[in-house]
Structure formats: C-alpha cells, structure tokens
Image (spheres, rainbow, N blue to C red):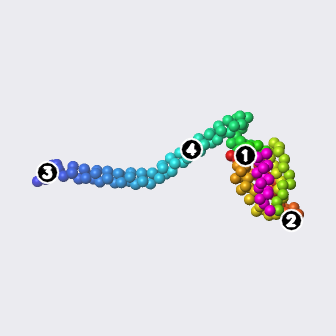
Amino acid sequence: MAAPVDLLQVHDRRERGQAAKGWRLAAGLAAALLVSPLILMAAEGLRDRAAADRAEAGARAGAVKLYPELATADDPAPEALRRLDAGPPSGGTARAMAAVFAAVERMPGAELDDATLGGEGLRVTLAHPTFNDLDAVRADLAEAGLAVVDETSAEEGGRMVSTLTIGGAR
C-alpha cells in the first residue's frame, strides 16, 4: 500500500530552492567583483574632471581679476600668463638691468649688445661665446626673481647672439 502523499517531496523542493539561491548569490557576487573596478574608475574620472573644472574656473577668475579686459576671452589664463611674463619686471627696469649687467659680467667673453623697453617688456640682445652660456644667464636672472624667455639665438661670426625678453617672475 502506497501513501497517497509523499511527505519527503517538500523537503527536496526546499533543498533545490536553496541550492539555486546559493548559485544566484555566487553569480551576483562574481558580477559585483567584476564590475566594481569599473565603477571605481568611473568615480575617479568624475572626481578628476570636477577638480580640473574647479582649477580652470579658478585660473579664469584669477586672470580676469588681474586683467578685466580678458573677461570676454574664451581662455584668459594663457593670455594672462603671457602678459605677466612680458610685463615689467618686479622692482622696475633699473633693477632688471642691474641683474642683466651682473649676469653678463659673470660670463667671460659676453657682451650686452642692445636693451630696449617696449610693449613686450624688456628685451636684451647678448653676444656670448657658446650656447651654454645662456643657461648661466638664465640661472642668474631667475635667482634675481626675473623670468627669461629666449626669443632667438643664432650664430654670427663665431659667436652666439641671443635676444631675451625679461619680465617679472610669477
């Protein structure tokens, strides 16, 4: 005689459901493990982008504060930096020329050919024996708090002739 109801059937169904539930949990955890680095990289990228936007806004605000006429420019920061580099040296032209004379005197065989003050700042033309001499002049002027931009350097008559724009260091 067979029992009309199999009482063990409920127990088997519960075990199968728990086994499937365990596999689903393992698959979900594996998927989360694979996706989490991507989520972290995306969050880091968003954070870096926000920091760059804040820095750009700060640079723009600083440039416009320094030069209000740049308010309508697309990117005023590079123009403001160019103006600062070409602007008058801190301490005035006399101080800058004194630093130039001192740097030229320290360099054997160097001469100051020309010095002009105009809209682009103080421009000096130096004649010196080798190209490497210019590095010593740059170092001396940087030590004096001046920014130096090498406009041109060419060899003339066995000597180097360099034109420099000297402005205030940032």
Question: Residue 72's x, y, as percent?
Answer: 71, 35
Query: For the magenta stretch, what is the residue range?
Result: 94-108
Asked if disc 3 and disc 4 are in contact, CB closer than 8 Å, the reply is: no
Q: Quadrant of residue 64?
A: top right
Question: Residue 135's x, y, as percent?
Answer: 74, 59
Q: Residue at x 84, y 49 (%)?
A: 115
- The amino acid pointed to by label 4 is Ala
Q: Residue at x 47, y 53 (%)?
A: 37
Circle 2 residue: 158
Asked if disc 2 and disc 1 are in contact, CB closer than 8 Å, the reply is: no
Question: Residue 77's x, y, as percent?
Answer: 68, 42
- The amino acid pointed to by label 3 is Ala
- The amino acid pointed to by label 1 is Gly
Circle 1 residue: 168
Question: Residue 98's x, y, as percent?
Answer: 78, 50
Circle 4 residue: 51
Q: Residue 89 versus residue 43: which sits nearer the camera?
A: 89
The Cα–Cα distance between marks 2 and 1, rounded to whole angstroms, is 32 Å
Q: Residue at x 73, y 34 (%)?
A: 69
Circle 3 residue: 3
Task: Determine crowd level at label 4: few under 14, some 14-19, many 20+ residues with C-alpha closer than 10 A.
Answer: few
